Amino acid sequence: MANIIIVGTQWGDEGKGKIVDCLTEKSNVVARYQGGHNAGHTVVIGGDKFILHLIPSGILHKDKMCIIGNGVVVDPLALITEIDELKARGISVTGNLKVSKNAHLIMPYHVLLDGWKELKKGSKKIGTTGRGIGPCYTDKASRAGIKMLDLFWPGQFKEKLNTNIADINCMLEQIPDVKKLDADEIYNKYISYGKQLEPYVDDTDITIDEAIKSGKNVLFEGAQGTLLDVDHGTYPYVTSSSATAGGAMTGLGVGPKTIDEVYGVAKAYTTRVGEGPFPSELTDSTGESLREKGAEYGATTGRARRCGWLDFVVLRHAVRVNGLTGLIITKLDILDDMEKIKVCVGYKFRDALLRDFPKELPVLEGCTPVYEELDGWRGSSTAGVRSYDKLPQKAKDYIGVIEKTLGVPVVIVSTGQDRDDIIYR
Ligand code: GDP
Ligand code: IMO
Ligand code: MG
């Protein structure tokens, strides 16, 4: 198989985890390139459910190399916990899980700052996962970050940590009822995390390069989605990393010529968790029924996901900024009961009809969706269908409209939670 990037085309939770798990069968290496344990990727195998946050969704296959790249921000305790949970369920991570030395670490003060900043924003809050993601990437960009490798250079680690803690404690003085941080306590904890993670720490850029040179193929796993990307998303209502395909290059240290295909994962409708604009959102009973049928509750925070119709303005943007060569449509089965299905073909802003996703937040917030209505396939089910020919004709028509509108082939259709509920075309 080729070297493929799997990227979310909407606001995350498109079913990337399931798709990465399925495509791992034909890959040798699975590599995560950004985000952190804000991600929640659900994989279901024969009824057994696994939720992965930091570890690539390929880990459930034996003998596949799984890499956490330099672009990922790692909370060491979250990683240790995830490793332990997998081990307890009989999943081997020894020898096949590698974490980049260059990955930045989420520190306790990042989590505090995440919460504090959200609180200060009040009604303008982003609705973060509270995992410290934004403050960690902030420190990385401002050159105050602490990397995985620092845990193995105690002197250097202590110096960096002391500097950061002194700054943070100055700030914490202004927050009532918050205790100052104890640098020594954090130092000791993190040194102990380092000891536990040492067997996994690696020069992952070199490992991937060697794998590719020896003819192995890599599946690049994106977290979040295009509209949550720090550059191409609905800023500031985004996450703090490059979730789009470009992030795979910097987040793992590979060149663009390595990539053969870029597949965008899209739900057959749209969801978003957290605050921020969502033009095709349904706040009525149709939205409610999508949420209930699709079990649209966050895998990381348990929050209800906002639901709406498929949005071609969003998807056109995702096709362009990721250079998609294929689309993967998930959760087609959730539309089974719909008599009519709407698709958003443009946005109306004042007197203008917009076809391209607007960059200005006030424009985006003032847009109303323009819909086209399609026939549903109520009465015949797509749930668990495993061959394209067996899909109801109207469901095939829906896939056809997606392909025609976006000019990109739909290469995979997912028809259920389970690993086997999938159609390869
Ligand atoms: P990710 O973050 O992109 O990996 O997506 P999540 O795992 O957070 O959310 C997708 C949810 O939909 C998970 O609960 C999956 O098990 C589930 N899922 C994925 N594909 C399908 C599908 O085709 N049909 C149904 N019914 N559920 C699916
Ligand atoms: P996966 O990989 C959906 C959202 C949060 C919030 C915004 C910023 O499972 O698709 P952060 O904690 O990253 O600073 O929060 O991004 N968000 C996600 N939404 N799926 C995710 O990951 C997400 N990761 C972050 O809800 O709106
Ligand atoms: Mg998710």
Image (tube, helix red, strand yellow):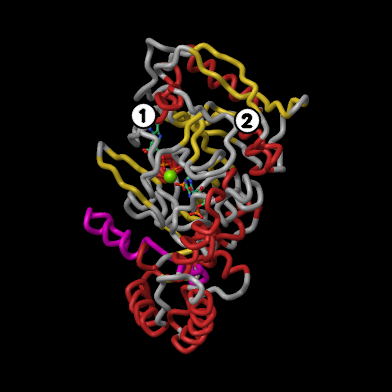
Is residue 191 within the magenta segment? no
> What kind of element bears circle 1?
helix
Q: Residues within 10 Å of mark 2 (few under 14, many from 20)?
A: some
Against 213, residue 165 (above or below) is: below
Give residue 294's position: percent from left, percent from top: 38, 30
**Residue 362 spot, x, y in % from top left:** 69, 40
Q: Is residue 215 visible?
A: yes
Tell me which label, 1 or 2, sits earlier in the chain.
Answer: 1
Q: Residue at 57% across / 57% down in the picture? A: 240
Q: Amino acid at mark 1?
A: Glu
User: Which residue is under mark 1?
Assistant: 292
Q: Is mark 1 within 8 Å of ligand 1?
A: no
Magenta part of the protein: which range? 79-106
Identify which amino acid the numbered label 2 is placed on.
Val
- Single out the residue that lies furthest toward the right: 351
Pointer 1 with pointer 2, Cβ within 8 A: no
Q: Residue at x 40, y 39 (%)?
A: 304
Q: CA distance from mark 1 to mark 2?
A: 30 Å
Q: Tell me if residue 322 comes above or below residue 109 in the rendering.
A: above
**Residue 219 visible in the displayed image:** no
Residue depicted at 27% across the width and 55% down the height: 91
Q: Closer to the camera, 135 or 115?
A: 115
